[in-house]
Amino acid sequence: MASVPAPETGGGRETAPAVTAPHRWRALGALAAGLAMIVLDGTIVGVALPTIIRDLRLGLNQAQWVNALYSMIFAALLLASGRISDRIGRRRQFIAGVAVFALGSLLAGLASGAGLLIAARAVQGVGGAMVLPTTISTVNATFRGRDRAAAFGVWGAVMSGSAAIGPLLGGVLTTWASWPWIFFVNVPVAVLVIAAALAWVPESRGRDDRAGYDVLGLLLSAAGMGLIVFGLIEGSQLGWWTPREDLVAGPFVWTATAPVSAAPVALILGAVLFALFLGWEARTARRGRAVILDLALFSVPTFSWGVVAAAMVAVGEFGLVFVMPLYLVFVTGLDPMGAGLVLAAMAIGAFLSGAAARHVAARFGAPRTVVLGLALEVVGTAFTALVLGPGTSPTLVAATMAVYGFGLGLASAQLTSTVMVGVPVEQSGSASATQSTVRQVGSALGTALAGTALAVGLAARVPARVAAVSGLDPEAAREVVGGTIGSAGGLIPALRAQGAAGPFGVRTPEVVDALARGFSDAASGSLWVATAFLALGLLASFRVAAAAKALPGD
C-alpha cells in the first residue's frame, strides 16, 4: 500500500566494508524486520481506533491526532534523517531509530489518556523517520549486481505487504488480546531487530560535497506542515472562523472571545511558513549548500506529476483507513476482528494485483498500468461511498474495498518506477527520499481531511436524522446527538446494547437507527472527499504517462 522509493544510487560516494554472502541476506532480514515494524504502525492503529476511543474517551479530533501525528512527524524528519545517517553511520542510526520507536510503542501501550498516547505516537514518528532511510541506503550500499535487484524486490514487498496486513493484524491483536498490544508487540520485535543488526548489518556512510545540514529548512517545513494539519484537525472543535472554545497550550491561551478562531490562523500561518520553506530551499541550493528538498527535481515532468499522484493516493488511502473502521465497528456492529477481515479484502486485492502488475506493465507499459490502477481506486472508493448504510452487508463493503485494493496494487507497483524514469541517476537518492516524504505528508493530510469531513458531516446529518424521529424529549435528543458527534459514533453501540431499556424506552432502537444513518451519511461524505483526491491523482497519472511517452527512447 506504500509507494516504493527507488534505490539510492548516486550523488555521493559510499563507504562500506565487504560483507560475506550469508551475512548480506541476514542483514537484509534484520533491515526488513525493522522496516515492517514501522510501516505496519501506519495502518495497524485504524482498526483498533474505535476501541481506543471508547476506552480512553477520545473525541474525534483527538482520534485524528492519534492517526495523523505519526505520519506528520515521520514526514517532517524523513529527508533530514536520511542525510544525517549518511554522516553518522546508517547502522548506528538504524539501531537508535528502532530503540526510539520501541520506546514510543511502550509509552503508547501504557497510555491511560489522550495526551500520553498522542505524545507516544510522536516519539514513534521520530523513530520511524530514523529507520526508513537507513534501510534503503544500507541495502544499496551492501548489495551489488543481481543480488541488489533481488534485495530491493524484498524491500519493496515488505514495504507494501506490511502496510496491507496492518488492519487485519490490528483486528487480531485487539480482539484476542487488547488494543495496547498493537503497540507492545513492537518491543520484543525491536529487541530482536537490534540484536540482529549488531550481529549482521554492516556500517556504511555516504559522502556529499555540499556543506551544512539545512536546519532552517527542516524547521520551516515541520512548522508549516504541523500548523496546516493542526488547523484541519482542530477546526471542527475550535471553530472554522468564529471561536467556539478556548485553546490552551501550556501557558498560551487563545480565548473563545478572540475575534477569530485559532484554526484559520494556523492554516494561513502554515501556508506562509511552507512558502518560506520553498523559497529558502531554492536560495540555499543556488549557494551550493545542502537542502532537504531538491526543487530542481520538479523540473522533470514525470517526477513532478508523479509525486502529485503519489500524494493524492496517500490522501485517499489514509482517509479510507481512518473512516472505514469507525463505520464498520460503530454502525454495522462488527468487532475489531470482523472489521479487520473486511479491510483485509483491500489487502488481498492489493497483493493479487501487485503480483500481476509486472505482467500487465509488460503488455501495456508501466504508465498505463498506473492509470488503470488509479481508475480502479476511484471506482472502488466511489462504490463504497454509495453503498454505506446501517443495513449494508459487510460482504458487499468487502467487495467494493477489494476493487479499490486491486487498483492500489497495480498503481503502487508501477508508480515509483514511472516517476523515477526521467530522473538523472545522480539525483535518484534525493528523488526517492522526496517521494517518500510527499507520501507521508499525504498520509497525515488524508487523516486530517477525512476526519474534518466526518466531523462536518456528523454535525449536519446526525441532528437532522434524529429530528425526523417524532415524539422524543428535546433535551434528551440534543444530549444523544452531542454524545454521538463528540464520541465519533462511539455512543451508538452502547445505545444499541441497551435496547428498549435505553433512555428513549421502546423508541431507543429507532433513535439508534437514526444515529447510524446519520453516521453513515457522514462517512459516505468523507469517502467522497477521498474519491475526489484519488480522481486528482488519476488526472496527474495521465500527465505522468504523457511525460513518460515523450522521453527519449520511449
Image: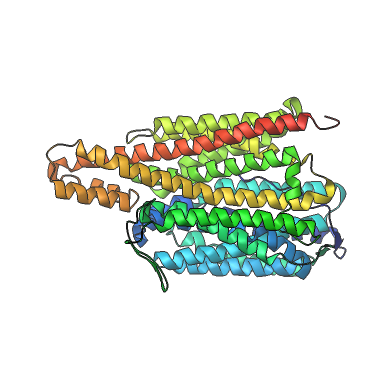
User: How did the renderer colour the structure?
Assistant: rainbow
Q: Is residue 220 visible?
A: yes
Q: Position of residue 60 (x, y in %)?
A: 38, 53
Image-based side of 206 in relation to 157, left or right: right
Residue shown at the point (53%, 52%) measured from the top left: 444
Q: Quadrant of the N terminus?
A: top right
In the displayed structure, 32 sits above or below 405; it is: below
Residue shown at the point (49%, 49%) measured from the top left: 447
Q: Position of residue 91 (x, y in %)?
A: 74, 67
Image-based side of 554 in relation to 192, left or right: right
**Which residue is at the front of the view, 503 or 479?**
479
**Furthest residue in direction bottom, as rendered:** 251
Residue shown at the point (57%, 67%) measured from the top left: 102
The part of the image, by quadrant, that contains residue 214 is bottom right
Image-based side of 54 in relation to 47, left or right: left
**Which residue is at the front of the view, 47 or 436?**
436
